[in-house]
Image: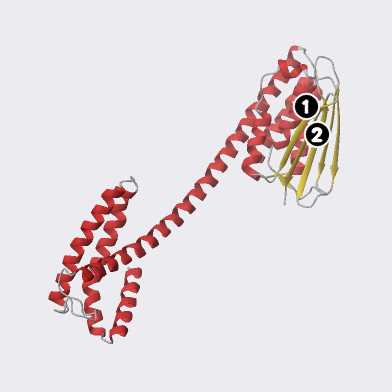
Amino acid sequence: MIFWLGYFLFNFVRWGSYFNDYWYSLKSNLVEFPIHIVIVYINIFILIPKFILHKRYIEYILSLSFMLSMVYLVRTGLNYLLVTEEIWPEAEDPSQFMEFNHIIAVILGELYVIGFVTAIKLLIDWSIEKRRNEALAKLQMSTELKYLRTQIQPHFFFNTLNNLYALILDKSNNAAGLVLKLSDMMQYILYEVKSSKASLLKEISHINNFIDIERLRFDDNVEVEMDIIGNIEDINVPPLLFLSFVENCFKHGMKDNDELEITMCFDVSTSGFLEFTIINNFNPKTLKESDKGIGNENAKRRLNLLFSNNYILDFKIENNNYNLFLKIPVK
């Protein structure tokens, strides 16, 4: 209503000033604007959805042509009865009803109104749809991230319970210690990890807990060296992201009574980025014997969702060592 009122006032002042006859401008616009409104909304809500959106362009042109023909007859008749008996007072020379130039002038005027208002309506609809799609994309990404995190948790607990089962079979005294460690990790995962970000300090503590659990299983045949470079107190990272990489060290690095050596580094000295490096001795046989895990694929998917192309993930096998490098933005 605000739009049509503003458009009406604009036309009233425009043509009244042009002809220096505001009374004529008011009467003619009062007759023509209801017609404008009707044909505009017929085009927007009937013709475009029914024909254009279904690619029935010829039917649309025929329907629009028929509507404009009816508009010419109705508009000319109402102007003649209610405004002036002159068929086309705006023209320099007197015109007759159904004269070609008069028909073209009326139709072009209506096409201008239809095109102008339809363009505004489509622009508004596009803007609303764009915002809606952006909101849906955010919701979808958030939902998928939550799903990927829930994938990690059962995966981790399944492996840890297998560890506990092995210790119980061996009647190991370490079983009780593993249960306590597992309890601490469950508390962290179930109650403390609630958002898309977690403190790097807590994540490192969580990783140490996991390593302690694996040490209980492998009778301390595990050597881990961890370096931290820079101030990590205020650094937040995706929760449980690094755990899958550490878990892979045990999955592919341990075989029979071998010793596992792991070196990892968290470096936040580069402005705005965290560089994570992990190296472990690698046993090629584990690739053939182990089932396909979800850890790395899960991590890649999470990184793509969170950082798009603004991250680096690189891993390779070199000299019987598995090397992984990850760089992500943290500020």
Q: Is residue 290 above or below residue 295?
A: above
Q: Image point 59% across, 38% down: which residue?
A: 146
Q: Is residue 15 above or below residue 70?
A: below
Q: Image point 42% across, 59% down: which residue?
A: 123
Residue 147 on image: x %, y %: 58, 35
Residue 246 on image: x %, y %: 76, 31
Q: Judging from the image, what secondary structure is the residue with disc 1 in?
A: helix
The three-letter code of the residue at mark 2 reads Ile
Give the quadrant of residue 184. top right
Residue 271 on image: x %, y %: 79, 52
Q: Judging from the image, what secondary structure is the residue with disc 2 in?
A: strand
Please name whichever residue, 76 or 263, is drawn nearer the observer in this view of the structure.
76
Q: Which residue is mark 1?
A: 249
Label drawn at residue 204 = none
Cα separation between marks 1 and 2: 9 Å
Q: Which residue is mark 2?
A: 278
Q: Residues within 10 Å of mark 2 (few under 14, many from 20)?
A: many
Q: Earlier in the sequence, mark 1 or mark 2?
A: 1
Q: Are marks 1 and 2 in contact (CB under 8 Å)?
A: yes
Give the quadrant of residue 209. top right
Residue 4 on image: x %, y %: 32, 69
Q: Image point 55% across, 47% down: which residue?
A: 138
Q: How is the image coloured?
A: secondary structure
